[in-house]
Image (cartoon, rainbow, N blue to C red):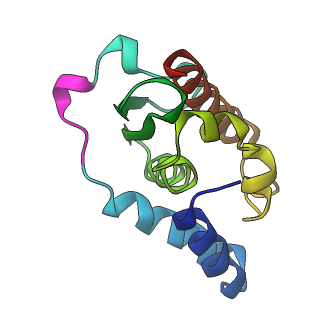
């Protein structure tokens, strides 16, 4: 189960023939994301386990399992900023209950990311997914 935005992204990736094009698309997605207000670049929003610096600021509308999940994020590395945008497409707009049901590794595998990211980047994505899931679990 993924958001409609992620389904659109998966379709776009299906049309991009090689990894170079997909890589550029991920970077472009990161460039399109709004910058995170510097006031939110604080230790409690920093994601540990990433090779570059990453901050994720959860935004919840409502309470309990039906609260709508969203987040803002930023990184000092362009590809990681793009990966944040990919995760935003995957999770944004879902309820926190739905966020907990998303099989992120399977969904990201549909994009072919697994075989093209370094182990450090893969660990970083896993850390970001863990933070998102923790936030959703606390909200639910």
- Where is residue 14? Give x, y as percent: 71, 81
Residue 22 covered by magenta stretch: no
Please report the bounds of the magenta region as a residue range.
Answer: 35-40
Q: Is residue 23 above or below residue 70?
A: below
- Quarter of the picture containing the N terminus is bottom right
Q: How many dots with numbers?
A: 0
- Tell me: 62 left or right of 1: left
Q: Is residue 12 above or below residue 87?
A: below
- Quarter of the picture containing the C terminus is top right
Q: Residue at x 57, y 74 (%)?
A: 8
Q: Nearer the viewer, residue 101 or 37?
A: 101
Q: Residue at x 58, y 71 (%)?
A: 9
- Tell me: 71 left or right of 51: left
- Report whether residue 75 is seen: no
- Answer with the quarter of the image where residue 56 lies: top left
Q: Is residue 6 above or below residue 39?
A: below
- Where is residue 26? Give x, y as percent: 52, 64
Looking at the image, the residue that sits furthest to the top is 44
Q: Residue at x 55, y 26 (%)?
A: 136
- Where is residue 2? Give x, y as percent: 65, 56
Q: Residue at x 34, y 61 (%)?
A: 31
- Report whether residue 24 is seen: yes
Q: Nearer the viewer, residue 2 or 12?
A: 2
- Answer with the quarter of the image where residue 131 lies: top right
Q: Is residue 57 above or below residue 13?
A: above
- Tell me: 63 left or right of 38: right
Residue 39 covered by magenta stretch: yes
- Where is residue 71? Give x, y as percent: 39, 39
């Amino acid at each position: 189960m993924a958001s409609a935005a992620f389904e659109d992204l998966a379709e776009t990736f299906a049309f991009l023939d090689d990894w170079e094009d997909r890589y550029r698309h991920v970077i472009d997605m990161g460039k399109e994301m709004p910058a995170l207000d510097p006031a939110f670049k604080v230790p409690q929003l920093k994601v540990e386990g990433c090779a570059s610096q990453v901050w994720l600021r959860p935004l919840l509308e409502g309470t309990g399992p039906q609260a709508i999940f969203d987040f803002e994020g930023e990184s000092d590395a362009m590809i990681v900023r793009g990966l944040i945008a990919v995760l935003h497409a995957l999770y944004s707009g879902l309820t926190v209950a739905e966020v907990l049901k998303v099989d992120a590794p399977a969904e990201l595998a549909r994009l072919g990311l697994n075989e093209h990211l370094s182990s450090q980047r893969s660990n970083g994505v896993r850390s970001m997914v863990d933070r998102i899931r923790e936030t959703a679990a606390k909200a639910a």
